Image (tube, rainbow, N blue to C red):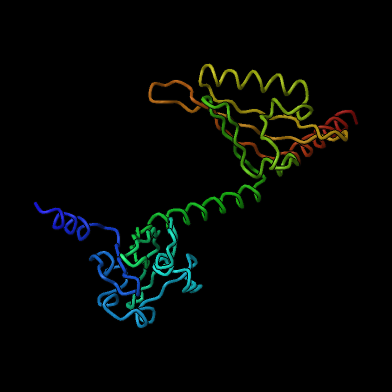
Amino acid sequence: MDKAELFKGIIEASPNAIIAADPDGNLIAFNPAAERLHGPGSLNLPMGERPGKYGIFMPDRVTPFPRDQLPLQRVLRGELVDNLEMYVRRPDGGGSVVSVTGKPLQDQNGRWGGFIIATDITERKRAEEALTASEARLREAQRVARMASWEWDSATNAVTWSQEIYNLLGIDPDQETPSFLEREGLLSAFTTESLQAAVERTRSEGLPYEMDIELLNGNGKTGWLAARGSAVLDSAGAVTGLRGTVMDITERKRTELRNAVLAKRLSLA
């Protein structure tokens, strides 16, 4: 098989949009994926008419992409383009988010032409946006409920706290994340001993735990968290980490204490 025909077949079959331009900005080649991206017939227009046929925007899909920063414009200036994200809106109103790379090539007169390759990342961006929205909802739910979550990875010994734990404890999230047991002065001695025993059982035996832990804030006052933890197991049943939640129950504990004091006074009356 002729190499030129082979390369032509590969380019035409590629799911990525491929466009090549001469030093004057004229498109000398583009594949079917490029035409699907921009809309039928859009790339056959003269260079000056093409931007009016379809729209190229920043990733926010609203802000027009600066014309002098368009991938082909940069390539024609002899610049490399590496994973530049943009939104291409077709004449029919549909569109795609793409990641563009480009490479300039010089002709025999030293003038720059080149090519760009655009990869459709629309689904990936939708997934990222959905994940970001989900994480935002989780943070808000935890803030309202005064509940937080944490994870520990046995392979790296890394502890990860959700944002609300920092809020509950009044700790700067930019600081290194310690475990509850490593944070000096955070827990009472009895709570430290009880929590340590519970965590060790979960690590060694995979047994979940649930307990109330007492917090110390250094000014004579205490707070309370309801703590739950469980093991993360691999396919063989070995413990590979721990995860759990904590919830602020300070007001509940104070109410229980007030009720207990009141009940005792009534019994003595």
Residue at the image point whose x is 45% and y is 26% from the top? 233
Residue at the image point whose x is 48% and y is 25% from the top? 240
Residue placed farthest to the left in the image? 1
Name the quadrant of the C terminus. top right
Estimate the x, y position of residue 50 in percent, counting from the top left: 35, 79
Estimate the x, y position of residue 102 in percent, counting from the top left: 38, 59
- Determine the image quadrant of residue 47: bottom left
Work out whether 151 lies above or below 188.
Answer: below
Of residue 78 and residue 109, the one placed in the foreground of this image is: 109
Residue placed farthest to the right in the image? 269
Estimate the x, y position of residue 48 in percent, counting from the top left: 37, 82
Left or right: 195 with respect to 118?
right
Work out whether 250 lies above or below 181.
Answer: below
Work out whether 190 lies above or below 215.
Answer: above
Of residue 247 and residue 253, the one placed in the foreground of this image is: 247
- Determine the image quadrant of residue 262: top right
- Determine the image quadrant of residue 101: bottom left
Residue at the image point whose x is 41% and y is 65% from the top? 71
Left or right: 65 with respect to 246?
left
Left or right: 34 with respect to 164?
left
Of residue 10 and residue 60, the one placed in the foreground of this image is: 10
Residue placed farthest to the front in the image? 109
Of residue 167 and residue 247, the one placed in the foreground of this image is: 167
Residue at the image point whose x is 42% and y is 72% from the top? 56
Work out whether 245 lies above or below 12.
Answer: above
